[in-house]
Image: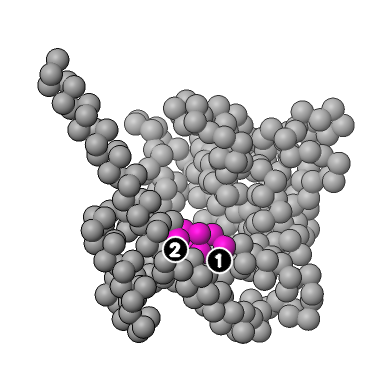
C-alpha cells in the first residue's frame, strides 16, 4: 500500500513539475515577445513569395489580371501561413517546456538585461530552434504552392477524365465504349450519365446533392464495374469508430472536393494486370485476372477484369 501511494505521489509530482515548466516557458517566451518575432518572420517570408506571384502564374498558365484568381491564391497562401505560424509557436513552447525552471529563469533575466537582442536569441537557443522549424516548413511550403494552384485551376476549369489504356493516354474517349453512370438516392437522378465522351468533361446536375451520390458504374467492353460502392462501410471499423465528419469527407471518393478541387479523375485499364504497379499489393491468393481497372478520384479503387 505504501509503495502504491509513493508511485501516485511521484506521478503527481511529475505532472505538477511539467505544468510549472510550461508556465515558466510561457513567461520566458512572453518576455522575449516570441509571438511577434515568429509572426513577423513568417509574414516576411510570405511577402517574398507574393512578390513572385507573376512567376507562379506564368508557370501554371494563370491570368494574373483575373482578380478572382489572384484573390483565391492570396487567401490560400494566407491560410497556410496562418497554420505554420501557429504550429511554430506551439512547437517553440513545447520545446522550452522541457527546459528546467532554473535555465528558463536565466533566459528571462538575460532578455531583460542584455541590450544585444541577437545575442539573446543565440544564447537562449531561440534562433536555432526557430531555424529548424522554418527549414521544415519551407519544404512543405514548396509543395503547397503547386497544390494551391491546382485547386484554383480546378475551380475555374471543368473536371475531366484522364483515360489510360495499356499505358497509352486516350485523347478521344468517344473512340472507346467507356462510360460512367452515377448511382444516387435522388428519385430524379437514380442513374445518370456523368461523362461527356466527346469532351471528357465530368458533369453532375447542379441540383444534385453530394451526399445523395452512392457509387459509379463504369462500363467498358460491354461489361459493368461498380466503383466506390459502400466506400465508408468498407473501411476498418476501428477507423470508422473515431472518424469525425471532416475525416469522413477525406475518405469519401465522391466528396464535394473530389468534384470541385480536382482537375482530373483518372481511369487506368491494364489488359495485362501485371503491368499495373499496384497489382501485387491487391492480388488475392490463387486469382488469375485477365485485366485490372484502377479508378482514382482522390483515392483509388480497383476493379478486376475476369
Residue 214 is tagged as none
Cα separation between marks 2 and 1: 21 Å
Q: Quadrant of the N terminus?
A: top left
- In this orientation, does residue 5 appear? yes
**Contact, CB < 8 Å: mark 2 with mark 1?**
no
Task: Tell me if residue 292 comes above or below residue 240 in the rendering.
Answer: below
Residue 93 sits in which quadrant? bottom left
Task: Indicate which disc, 2 or 1, sits on the residue closer to the N terminus.
Answer: 2
Q: Is residue 244 above or below residue 57?
A: above
Examine the residues drawn in magenta and state their main secondary structure: helix
- Which quadrant of the structure image shows residue 107? bottom left
Which percent across, then down, holds residue 145? 56, 70
Residue at which label 2 appears: 30
Say which of 120 and 195 sits in front. 120
In this rendering, the answer to whether 124 lies above or below 8 is below
Residue 81 numbered mark, or none: 1
Q: Residue at x 52, y 41 (%)?
A: 302
* Residue bounds of the magenta highlight: 80-89
Element type at marker 2?
helix
The answer to whether residue 141 shows anywhere in this view is no
Compared across the picture, whether 33 is left or right of 127 comes to: right
Amino acid at each position: 500500500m505504501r509503495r502504491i501511494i509513493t508511485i501516485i505521489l511521484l506521478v503527481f509530482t511529475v505532472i505538477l513539475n511539467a505544468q510549472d515548466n510550461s508556465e515558466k516557458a510561457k513567461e520566458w517566451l512572453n518576455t522575449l515577445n516570441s509571438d511577434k518575432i515568429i509572426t513577423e518572420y513568417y509574414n516576411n517570408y510570405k511577402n517574398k513569395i507574393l512578390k513572385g506571384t507573376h512567376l507562379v502564374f506564368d508557370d501554371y498558365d494563370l491570368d494574373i489580371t483575373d482578380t478572382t484568381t489572384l484573390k483565391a491564391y492570396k487567401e490560400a497562401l494566407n491560410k497556410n501561413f496562418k497554420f505554420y505560424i501557429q504550429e511554430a509557436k506551439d512547437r517553440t513552447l513545447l520545446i522550452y517546456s522541457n527546459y528546467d525552471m532554473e535555465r528558463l529563469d536565466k533566459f528571462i533575466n538575460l532578455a531583460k538585461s542584455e541590450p544585444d537582442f541577437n545575442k539573446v536569441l543565440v544564447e537562449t537557443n531561440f534562433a536555432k530552434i526557430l531555424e529548424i522549424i522554418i527549414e521544415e516548413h519551407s519544404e512543405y511550403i514548396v509543395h503547397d504552392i503547386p497544390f494551391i494552384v491546382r485547386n484554383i485551376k480546378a475551380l475555374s476549369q471543368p473536371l475531366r477524365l484522364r483515360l489510360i489504356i495499356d499505358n497509352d493516354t486516350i485523347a478521344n474517349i468517344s473512340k472507346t465504349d467507356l462510360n460512367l453512370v452515377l448511382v444516387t438516392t435522388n428519385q430524379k437522378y437514380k442513374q445518370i450519365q456523368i461523362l461527356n465522351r466527346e469532351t471528357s468533361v465530368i458533369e453532375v446536375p447542379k441540383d444534385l446533392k453530394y451526399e445523395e451520390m452512392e457509387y459509379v458504374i463504369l462500363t467498358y467492353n460491354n461489361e459493368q464495374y461498380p466503383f466506390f460502392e459502400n466506400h465508408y462501410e468498407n473501411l476498418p471499423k476501428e477507423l470508422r469508430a473515431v472518424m469525425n465528419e471532416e475525416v469522413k469527407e477525406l475518405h469519401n471518393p465522391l466528396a464535394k472536393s473530389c468534384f470541385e478541387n480536382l482537375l482530373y479523375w483518372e481511369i487506368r485499364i491494364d489488359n495485362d494486370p501485371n503491368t499495373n504497379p499496384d497489382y501485387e499489393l491487391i492480388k488475392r491468393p490463387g486469382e488469375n485476372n485477365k485485366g485490372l481497372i484502377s479508378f482514382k478520384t482522390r483515392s483509388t479503387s480497383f476493379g478486376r477484369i475476369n
